[in-house]
Amino acid sequence: MKIAFFSTRSYDREYFDRENARAKHHIWYVEAPLQEETASLAQGYAAVCLFVNDRVTAAVAERLATVGVRLLALRCAGYNHVDLAAAERWGLTVVRVPAYSPHAVAEHTVALILTLNRKTHRAYNRVREGNFALENLMGFDLYGKAVGVVGTGKIGKVFAQIMMGFGCRVLGYDPFPDAELAAAGAEYVPLDDLLQRSDIVSLHCPLTEATYHLINADSLDLMRPGAMLINTGRGALIDTKAVVQALKSGHLGYLGLDVYEQEEGLFFHDFSNEIIQDDLIARLMTFPNVLITSHQAFFTHEAMTEIARTTLHNVTAFEQGLPLENAVRRGG
Ligand code: NAI
């Protein structure tokens, strides 16, 4: 099948070419993101492949359908960036990669926590400059701390299990509690309780209308003074302006982000030689107790291999008219 592959990076090409040696689709790699201005590039391609910051608005869906696209193959798990109603209206089938490596994201979440806590990033730079002082590198034991996990699906569950290995108490909040996790000792509580009782709060729920700005000025007020907030879910789970205020007041002790509300057009690109125009992220970058990575939690060899394999499998299944186990439909 002919696939127009948007937002291509070097690593996408490497992993998809390797997997495509077997699948044998015709892939055209495009560096440009998928948006209204670029949708027409897909003319003559029955499928487009898109990533987390390629937005399929109603206008993009219309444009794609008009130039003959029939399949949207998402090479990611989240689908909040696709207007599913518009896709349905324009006869576009949507498939995704529901799970590739929950371990990749869960382990990166732990990396953020350990770095923020033990300040290994600062220690690395200090020692290289011949500074062996310990001032301002003080951390805290994870052992015995309460870790709140918002969303205990595939990623949240693996993360919770890792934190239990550190000797942490796990508090969970999820409309569908996980029986195995509860049996292992996780305590399911209402969200307000979780926020009030946790030393570390980590977000692993999808971005939906219900979870948009789940962390806002009110929920931040509920959190323990000095607590750590980690978001590897989606940027808009957090009201970033409210979080900046909570950091400025000192109420929020640490912030670790792998996703950011305005990451589109910023993350996955090199702006090291340019002036950053986004004042909010520029402000966040000034705090010593904030750590930002640019949506790299998924980025492991195992996850990329699985993403390429499942995406191409989805395309093949669509082409051959087979059942689409990874189809995304409106309302779940
Ligand atoms: P999943 O579908 O297995 O789990 C999500 C869980 O959130 C489910 O148990 C669901 O019941 C729960 N949930 C739904 N609404 C909720 C609410 N209002 N409050 C609390 N919990 C709620 O999804 P998975 O694979 O664990 O991924 C979670 C999210 O992580 C994805 O939606 C995606 O946004 C994000 N993600 C981030 C990546 C990164 O590289 N930073 C990579 C992959 C996923």
Image: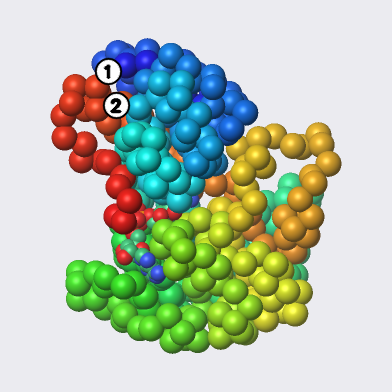
Given residues 95 and 92, the one toward you in this image is 92
Tell me the residue at 44%/68% (across/down): 210
| Upstream in sequence: badge 2 or badge 1 | 1
Image-quarter location of ligand 1: bottom left
Q: How far from the left and from the top, in percent, is residue 185?
A: 26, 78
Kind of residue at disc 1: Ala
For the residues labelled 2 and 1, the Cα–Cα distance comes to: 9 Å
Residue situated in front as seen by the camera: 277 or 291 = 277
Nearer-the-camera pick, 328 or 187? 328
The N terminus lies in which quarter of the figure? top left
Instruction: Identify the element where label 1 is drawn.
Output: helix
Q: Nearer the viewer, residue 147 or 80?
A: 80
Q: Residue at x 61, y 55 (%)?
A: 261
Q: Quadrant of residue 173?
A: bottom left
Q: Residue at x 44, y 61 (%)?
A: 208
Picture coordinates of residue 115, whole percent (x, y):
58, 59
Q: Is residue 267 visible?
A: yes
Query: Are the residues flagged by discs 2 and 1 in contact, CB closer than 8 Å?
Result: yes
Q: Which residue is mark 2?
A: 315
Horizontal arrangement in the rendering, residue 320 relative to residue 298 (left or right)? left
Mark 1 highlights which residue?
23
Name the amino acid, label 2. Val
Q: Does dot 2 land on a helix, a strand or a loop? A: helix
Looking at the picture, does residue 45 appear above or below residue 34?
A: above
Circle nearer the viewer, 2 or 1: 2
> In the figure, residue 253 lies in which quadrant?
bottom right
Residue 275 at x, y percent in the picture: 83, 41
On the rendered structure, is 119 left or right of 84?
right
Q: Decide: is 146 above or below 87.
A: below
